[in-house]
Image (tube, rainbow, N blue to C red):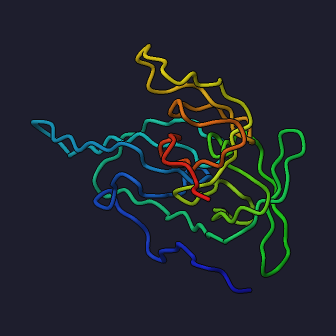
Amino acid sequence: MLFKNILREERMYTVADLKKGLKIILDGDPYLVIAFDFVKPGKGQALYRTKMRNMINGSLLDRTYRSGESFEPASLEERTMEYLYKEGNHYTFMDQQTYEQVVMEEEVLGDSKNYLLENLKVEVMLFGEKAIGISLPNFVNLRVSETEQWAKGDTSGNDSKPATVETGYVLRVPPFIEEGELIVIDTRTGEYSTRVKG
């Protein structure tokens, strides 16, 4: 089976490797280090305080480690997949090479669900056989399904208005954007970028 890239380190991590963004295994689950602090008390061993997020259920964990402790790297794999459809709270993606399908729940996707249109290609992160998250393209094109009319000459000072796009996501857009227009949204910020010309 061909995989785009396997994020795998063979050696164990030590506390000296701890840094923001590191992925390790704790109690059988993959965790992402989201904050890290090195503390050197007056006497005794240095301490490493970490805040980590469980990459499967999103729960946060605070742990303190001492020098000499080690961790197993989280072997995660990313595969390019196509978003197929939503059924209830479940979103289905398909591997283009193997036609294998994976399903993710809405809470696992988080805000990423706001940008999912059928046939969109995304990077699906897998831990073993379990899909635990996706990476979106930086920009997606979505059609405005609902927004207020803009009265030319309106000088109320409003430089934006709410708009709902075809996925149900609501964001602020410039007043000249109309229903039916295709706009570009930055998936990293969730903000309007520009409108699609043409």
Residue 84: horizontal and vertical position, in percent? 83, 59
In the displayed structure, does residue 111 sit left or right of residue 173?
right
Residue 33 horizontal side relative to residue 184, left or right: left
- Residue 106 versus residue 11: which sits nearer the camera? 106
The residue drawn where x is 52% and y is 74% is: 8
Residue located at (58% from left, 25% from top): 150
Q: Which percent across, then down, holds residue 86?
A: 85, 47
User: 118 left or right of 140?
Assistant: right
Query: Which of the pair 191/47 is nearer the observer?
Result: 191
How many marks on residues? Answer: 0
Q: Which residue sits furthest top? A: 156
Q: Residue furthest bottom?
A: 1
Quarter of the N terminus within the rendering: bottom right
Q: Is residue 86 above or below residue 23?
A: above
Q: In the rendered image, which quarter contains the C terminus?
A: bottom right
> Eyeballing the image, is 34 above or below 15?
above
Q: Is residue 95 above or below residue 166?
A: below
Q: Nearer the viewer, residue 182 or 66?
A: 182
Q: Position of residue 108 (x, y in %)?
A: 68, 44
Name which residue lies at 42% across and 57% down.
22
Query: Considering depth in this image, is 32 or 67 the residue closer to the camera?
Result: 32
**Residue with the most extreme right position:** 87
Q: In the current view of this chain or complex, which residue is farthest to the left?
A: 42
Estimate the x, y position of residue 160 in percent, counting from the top left.
49, 27
